[in-house]
Image (tube, grey):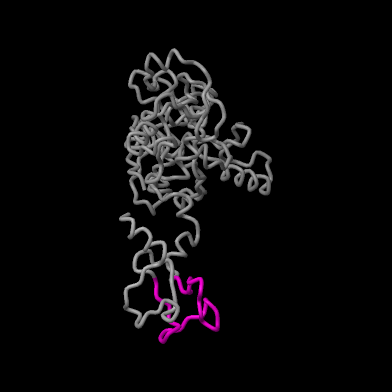
Amino acid sequence: MESEGPSKSLEEGNVEPDSSFEKINEKGNSSPSSGNNGISEESKTHQDKQIENVCIFCQLNEDNEFKYGKLYRLEDADNGRMITAHHYCLFFASGLCQKGSDNEGIQGFLANDIQKEVSRASRLKCSFCMKKGASVGCCIKKCRQCYHYPCGRDNGSLFRFYDDFVSFCSTHRPLQEFSTAEKMNLSLVKCPVCLEEVPNEPGFDVLKTPCCHNTFLHRDCIQQQALASGYYFFRCPICNNQKEFRDEMRSFGIHVPEQDAAWEREEGAFQELYQRHNKCDMEDCVCPKGNEHATTQGKWQIVLCDFCGSVGCHLECGRLERPSQDWACQSCRGMLSTGM
C-alpha cells in the first residue's frame, strides 16, 4: 500500500464534532438534525438510511471507484450512526489525518477524526457549487479556494496521491513543460492507449509522456491503465519506461496505487504455478494407456525437461534409465545448440 501520510492540516477552531453537522439529503436540501416536526418514525428512519448512503463529505451517493475511490462504510458507535465516505474524499480532506493502522476505522481514518473534519468543513463554502462542507483546500498558502473533492475534480483541480496528498486549484496547478517544437505542432495525434485522436497541446485532460517525443495521452485513459497495472507494472505504453514515466504521471495527478496488477489480484491467478506438468509430450509416445498416463515409479514415470520444466516424457519414451538422468526437450536442445 502507498505511504498515505497525513494531509496538510488546517486550523480546526473550537467546534464540537457534532454541533454544526447538518443532515443533507440526496438533493442537497438540509433537514432538521433533531425533532420529529410532524415526520413519522418510518419516514425519519427512511431519511436516516438515505443519509447513511451518501458520502459524509461530498453528499453524493455515487459508488464510482474510478472517479472517487471506494465507497466505505464505518459504524460510529460513539455517535450511533453509520459513516459513509469516498476514499478520495478522505485522502484530500485538508484537516484529516490517518491516526490509526490500516485495519482501524476506514483505512486508518478514525470515526472521531472524520466527524471533527466534517464539523470543520461545515463552515466552508465550496468555490464551485457554493454549498457548505468544502473539506479540500488548495495547498498554495495564499489561495483561499476550497471545494468538495468531486467539485474540484470536475473543475480542473489537480490531486497528488502520494506523500501529503495535496490538491492544487485550477489556477495554481502545475503545468507540463512543452518544447518549442511541440508547441508548434498542434496537429491531432493518437492516444496509444485508446487509439483515438488527442490534441497535441497542453491541457488538463491531456498528458505528455516524459520519455517519448510527441506522445500524448488522455488523462482518463492513463488513469485506467494505472489502476489496472498497479505500482509495479505501470509504465509508458510506447517505450516501457517505468520510473521516469510513473513519477511524471503521479506528479500531474494520476493515481498509481501501490498494489498488484489487476490480473494478479484475480482469484486463482497463480493457480497454474502450483500444478506440476504431468504428461508425456513425445510425438511417438509408446505408452499403451496414452500420454496422460503417469506412475510414481517404473518406465511410465514422467520426467520433466531440466531447463524449462514445462515439457515432459515417460522414461520409456525418452529412452531414459532413471528419473535423475539429464534430459532436455527438443526446444531447449535447439536453443542450447545455437548458443542462446
- As rendered, which of 172 and 61 lies closer to the eye? 172
**Quick check: 285 above or below 229?**
below
Give the residue displayed 57% in from the left and 43% down from the top: 63
Residue 38 in the image: x percent, y percent?
Answer: 68, 40
Count how many numbered circles sit on residues in the image: 0
Quarter occupied by residue 176: top left
Give the residue displayed 55% in from the left and 34% down from the top: 194
Quarter occupied by residue 254: top left
Q: Residue furthest bottom?
A: 298
Give the residue displayed 38% in from the left and 34% down from the top: 250
Residue 111 in the image: x percent, y percent?
Answer: 42, 47
* Magenta stretch holds residue 229: no
- As rendered, which of 246 and 35 lies closer to the eye? 246
Q: Is residue 294 visible?
A: yes
* Magenta stretch holds residue 283: yes
- As rendered, which of 196 and 257 lies closer to the eye? 196
Quarter occupied by residue 23: top right
> Majority secondary structure of the magenta segment?
loop
Q: Is residue 124 visible?
A: no
Residue 322 in the image: x percent, y percent?
Answer: 34, 82
Quarter placement of the C terminus: bottom left
- The magenta-colored residue range is 277-304
